Amino acid sequence: MKLFPSLPDTPHLADVYRRFPEHVKPLLDYHDRLLRGESPLTVGERELIAAYVSGLNACNFCYGAHKLYADIFGFDASIVEQMVADLETAPIDEKLKPLLRYAAKLKSLPPKLTPADARAVYDAGWTERALFDAIEIAALFNYMNRIIEGTGVAYDFDANPPTVDEREARRKRTYTDFGKALGID
């Protein structure tokens, strides 16, 4: 179902950004600061949270993109799939699970977050900064998932896996670089 007549039949996020460029540059800068800047969370852990929230939201575009980035930065894509299916049995470091539970609850039931939810994160060894970064990532991807779904973006990353060279290029590419490639400075 085509939602925007001015976009292609199966639009990519690049099409949306080119059509509505007004707010893209600061948004991509925010992505870079949050997902690639300094943090107690590794880039892989941040991409893992982005993929997890997007998977819970059933946003196939963001889920596929960030599952790919999580894989590029050290988390096998199958682990991300297992997390979305059942976090508790997924084969990931137990230290990550309280952060991911917090992100999941923030996605679905934000008013139900309690001090015990935060305490579980701290008890696992994370700092307030790590929790705040996880909160920002969860919030950003709830936002991005709605942009993607609301504009009808459709792209199947699983059906179009990148080559080894493309994976390496993605490892080095920033979100701002993506905007620049679209002509958004």
Image (cartoon, rainbow, N blue to C red):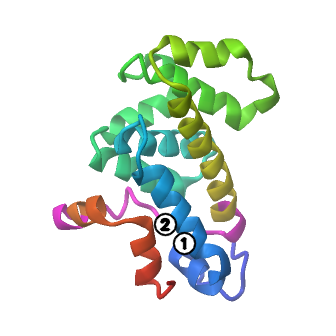
Mark 2 or mark 1, earlier in chain? 1
Q: Residue 13 carries which label?
A: 1
Q: Which residue is drawn at 58% across and 24% down?
A: 101
Tag 2 and tag 1, C-beta contact below 8 Å = yes
Is 35 contained in the magenta span?
A: no
Residue 146 point in image, percent of width and height: 69, 57
Q: Nearer the viewer, mark 2 or mark 1?
A: 1
For badge 2, the amino acid type reads: Tyr
At mark 1, the secondary structure is: helix
Residue named by callout 2: 155
Q: Can residue 154 be seen in this view?
A: no
Q: In this view, does 73 lie to the left or right of 113?
A: left
**Cα distance, mark 2 to mark 1?**
9 Å
Q: What stretch is highlighted in magenta?
A: 149-166
At mark 2, the secondary structure is: loop
Is 156 contained in the magenta span?
A: yes
Q: How crowded is mark 2: few (under 14 residues within 10 Å), some or many (20 or more)?
A: some
Residue 181 point in image, percent of width and height: 40, 82
Q: In this view, does 4 lie to the left or right of 124?
A: right
For badge 1, the amino acid type reads: Leu
Q: Residue at x 53, y 16 (%)?
A: 122
Q: How crowded is mark 1: few (under 14 residues within 10 Å), some or many (20 or more)?
A: some
Q: Which residue is drawn at 71% across and 15% down?
A: 115
Spot the residue most to the left. 164
Closer-to-camera residue (115/181): 115
